[in-house]
Image (spheres, rainbow, N blue to C red):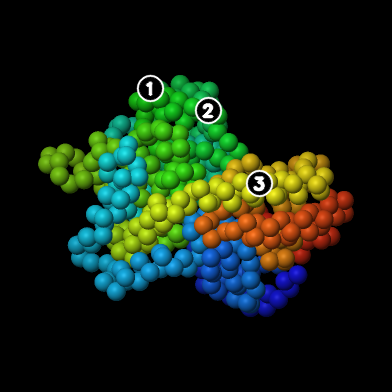
Amino acid sequence: MITNYYMSDQYRAKIHELIPGGAHTYSKGDDQFPELSPAAIAYGKGAYVWDIDGNKFLDCSMGLTSVSLGHAYEPVLERVREELAKGVNFQRPAYIEMEMAEAFLSLVPCHQMIKFAKNGSTVTTAAIKLARAFTGRRMVAFPSDHPFYSYDDWFIGQTACSKGVPPENAVLSVTYKSDDLVSLTELFEKYPGQIACVISEPEKNFGLSENYLQQAIDLAHKHGALYIVDEMITGFKTDFPGSIKKYNVEPDLATWGKGIANGFSFCALTGKREVMDLGGIKNDGQEKVFLTSTTHGGETHAIAAGLATIKEFQEKNVIKHNHGIGDYFLTKIGTEITASGLGEYIQMAACNWMPIFIFKDASGTPSMGMRTLFLQEMIGRGVLFQGSFVPCFSHTTEDVDFFADVFRASLERYKEGLSAGFEKLLTGSPIKPVFRKYI
């Protein structure tokens, strides 16, 4: 078991005085991990990371799903080094911006224009603005049971963390039950002629009913709204480039990020020309839509990383490898859960692009305490696990075998927790939900 977290403890003692939340995304915060876990990573290579105490871990979430090929993946680094030597930001656009625009749009033939940014919230909010400008409407609809779309008011105002968002802004967003056409239909009927767009992830880890996505797009169009597919998580995972291709649909707009540049900060908004062109400057006399204006959106090294990532996916059939690893994972871990007799308490989504887990207590209720105990046991045995497994091109079947061995040992401790209570086995406090009203 890994027990040395001396440097991590020193880091924790100081970092919250310097950075609110101790990290730049709440999912990386101390309250999202057991106390016995690394506080900071020193470096990563392939499918593994090393913390500041020198402990080695198999990486399961791969940079919150952003690393699709592997840490410090050499073909990407090589292209980045070449671009760095030329400079990274200029007074006018870099030539590489046109190269990327053409390359990325070739992957999304239903869209004709693209806009770059550095994070996902920027492009989702830009998509919302375009939809409002195009339809002349104000309201936004999104699923209430999807985890995250943006740190901007239109989304955060409808979560438990709404402090700081003017109520008059929050009421412009309305929610429905995901993957439920009846729920979405009822929303349009409740707010006739008021909803500018529906924004939703195209699918979740627990599956999608056949033809739902196309029917949802048709429903939005029937009511005069645009449909935005958020491929932030699904892009370069469910298919190449994403679920738009997998389900052969044509949304009005789509947002991209995470794995499309193997961890480098590159995100994109793509869309149909008649919508995207509202953010342009060529239509004399037309009222201008100030879409986005990001100084660093055209940073050349991140774009180069994206181009190199696309090349690897095209030449090495990365999707086939990653799905193969996912299928192997589902078989191995499913066998372990069945053999342990804990299928009633540990649920795994049969999703080869990102299996996720639900952990329940003795009463069959999802439990943060039991979840934290399981993470503690996995991490202590060298697997940096946060409740999901994101296959990347650097993962091997041997890595999955190692995960399965650690998973099996952790299941035994889980059994103890079910009978004795997690409190007797857990060091520190249980993990807390990211979206909660009080700290």
| Separation of marks 2 and 1 at Cα, in angstroms | 20 Å
- The answer to whether residue 337 is left or right of residue 223 is right
Please tell me the numbered disc located at residue 330. 3
Residue 285, visible in the rendered structure: yes
Label 3 or label 2, whichever lies nearer to me, is: 3
Earlier along the polypeptide chain: callout 2 or callout 1? 2
Mark 2 residue type: Glu
Mark 3 residue type: Leu
| Separation of marks 3 and 2 at Cα, in angstroms | 22 Å
Dot 2: within a 10 Å radius of its alpha carbon, few (fewer than 14), some, or many (20 or more) residues? few
Dot 1: within a 10 Å radius of its alpha carbon, few (fewer than 14), some, or many (20 or more) residues? few
Name above or below for residue 424 compared with residue 8: above
- The answer to whether residue 242 is left or right of residue 13 is left
- The answer to whether residue 353 is left or right of residue 412 is left
- Asked whether the residues under the numbered discs 2 and 1 touch, taking CB atoms below 8 Å apart as contact, a structural biologist would say no
Mark 1 residue type: Lys
> Based on the displayed image, in which of its 4 quarters is residue 423 positioned?
bottom right
The residue at which mark 2 appears reads as: 210
x, y percent for residue 63: 52, 60
Label 2 or label 1, whichever lies nearer to me, is: 2
For image coordinates 49% across by 56% down, the residue present is 68
For image coordinates 27% across by 49% down, the residue present is 102
The residue at which mark 1 appears reads as: 222
Label 3 element class = helix
Residue 170, visible in the rendered structure: no
**Nearest to the observer: residue 369 or residue 138:** 369
x, y percent for residue 325: 59, 51
For image coordinates 12% across by 41% down, the residue present is 284
x, y percent for residue 410: 77, 58
